[in-house]
Amino acid sequence: MLMVAPAFLHALIWIGIPVIAAFVLSFTNYDVLTQPRFNGIQNYLDALTDPVFRRGMLNTLVYAFFTVPVAMGIALLIALMLDTQLRARAFFRTAVFIPQVTATIAVALVWLWIYDPRNGLLNAVLGFFGVPAQNWLSSTTWAMPSVIAVGIWQGIGLKMLIYLAALQSLPKDVYEAASVDGASKTRQFFSITLPLLKPATFFVFVTSVISAFQAFDLIYILTDGGPANTTTMMTYEIYKSAFREFRVGYACAQSIILFVFLLLLTLANRRLNGGDSGRH
Amino acid sequence: MAGIDLTATSPRTTLDVVGRSPASRRRLGRAALYVALGVIAVVMVVPFVWMVLTSLKTPADIAASPPTFLPTEWAWSNYADALAAAPFLTYARNSLVIAVSHTTINLLVASMAGYALARLRFRGSELVFLGFVAALMIPTYTKIIPEFLIVRFMPLFGGNDILGQGGTGWLDTWWALIVPGAVTPFAVFLFRQFYLDLPVELEEAARLDGVSELGIWARIMTPLVKPAFITVALLTFESSWNNFLWPLLVTRTDSMRVIQVGLSVFRTENDTQWAFLMAGTTLATLPMVVLFLLGQKYFVRGFANAGIK
């Protein structure tokens, strides 16, 4: 019991108490300088009716949609391609995974330079193919897709890797039996591979949703939430409310809303997977 | 690792009826596969190459539109100039101190906790474990504001009185940079998984010989889960080195800044001097890439294990 105590106390002070404090403060008006004042559910009403925070919620959902299910599809496709007797497989695996271990700040700075409208690599490459130059990050049309692209680029390696590991641990005999029975490759994929990948899918989904909903560094460097709030996220609004406007109670309410979003998504996924993954 | 496989290669699909011989079809499929993977690899690698190349370009090359891929003149002095333009070495040293501290503390504290939760039965152990699992679920952004307040109002530090008023608490100190992030529930969870797999006979034999619980953990069980230690060490070091928002919030002065914050500040303060910025970014990225290449197996296992179990 003493052996758990240090970790337990640490978690209590730096996770347990903060979460409870965030919940309590979310019902108050608090600006750090004066005592918090109880104001009921006013912060929640404000957050849910504030057009900018609503935009942030919508953007977060859009960003999560592309960087989670869509990126998972792409990752599975790459994993299937790599799950063959392929020379240079180790090289590909490394190439895809390196962005994952690189700091998001570093990644975002490099992409900021690539997206540069005048001297950037992207416009140069597209220009070579006759595509006109774009102001990627300052256009209300292109800013969000540009941010999403970097999100997918950075996160794809981990998803791919987990799928690859799962693919390589699938039982061989099932496929042999299926081949004997004359099941086509496509049929085998949908009836055997996908169902067997469920635990991996559940894990990738949950961890990716958690990180997608907490995308912050990318936005901080690439767009600062702009142009016209088209790329702002829930996390970015929380940061702005708390540390730029000092509306701490309000920011706490926003952070609880973020938590509820994540909780609901995780539970929904668990339900969809038939509680199956819970038993693994 | 070598799990060479099962499904994808043998091209005995129904589509094979298209007239070509199976052998040439196989070669065609293979070529397509290589092209697809090649394109993906280029997309993944080019930004890093571009980062390094930019860091070696002269201002004239940087301003060229359209840009040339390779520098016309290799400006190796950019690195020395970048280090002179901003204290990147101080930033990197700070990051290193924090990452090493986090790694050491996390290995010690989380492995003890993981061991106790896996092997020892005590009152409330189930509840404590559930607590850690719940802690895994808490988003950073839900706890970061109160964490900041705790640090800011830390009693008796940074000029604060016993009630935490009057000063700045732990702000802009090593305490704030190191303590709150030192132990992660994820590490506790991962260690527990590894200790669970060990045979029970070993610890029973040791217990009969009168070895203390702490001794069993330190001398008998821990040497058996070395891979867990390497995995947790790499993951902790990596996330600590790459962390941005927390150090951004709790540091004010240049001398306390970490590398990621330093880079973002350099960008805003110096009207984005791309060659220097990319030199700094390269320096910040290099240690992680090297660490990853050295410990790839453990990184992969750390992430993937959790995914399959």
Image (cartoon, rainbow, N blue to C red):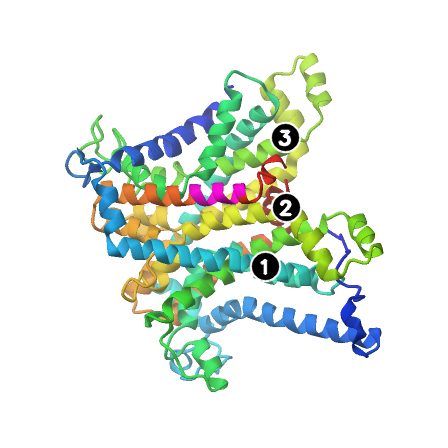
Q: Which residues are magenta?
A: A263-271
Secondary-structure class at tag 1: helix
Local crowd size for mark 3, using a 10 Å CA cut-off: few (<14), some (14–19), many (≥20): many
* Frontmost residue, B93 versus A32: A32
Task: Pinpoint residue A254: horizontal percent, then vertical percent.
Answer: 30, 45
Residue ID at (72%, 48%)? A169
Check disc 1 and give the amino acid type.
Ala
Look at mark 2 in the image and give the residue it sits on.
Answer: B301
Instruction: Name the chain letter of the residue that bears numbered label 3.
Output: B
Q: CA distance from mark 2 to mark 3?
A: 15 Å
Task: Pinpoint residue B302: horizontal percent, then vertical percent.
Answer: 60, 44
* Quadrant in the rendering for residue A79: bottom right
Q: CA distance from mark 1 to mark 2?
A: 18 Å
Look at mark 1 in the image and give the residue it sits on.
Answer: A75
Secondary-structure class at tag 3: helix
Local crowd size for mark 2, using a 10 Å CA cut-off: few (<14), some (14–19), many (≥20): some
Check disc 3 and give the amino acid type.
Tyr
Residue ID at (42%, 62%)? A108
Residue B195 has which mark? 3
Q: Is residue A228 visible?
A: yes
Indicate which disc, 2 or 3, sits on the residue closer to the N terminus.
3
Mark 1 on the same chain as mark 3: no
Instruction: Name the chain letter of the residue that bears numbered label 1.
Output: A
Task: Pinpoint residue B223: horizontal percent, then vertical percent.
Answer: 66, 32
Mark 1 or 2, which is nearer the eye? 1
Which residue of the protein is positioned furthest toward the left in this rendering?
A: A34
Whether residue B278 sits left or right of residue B26 in the image: it is left
Determine the main secondary structure of the stretch shown in magenta: helix
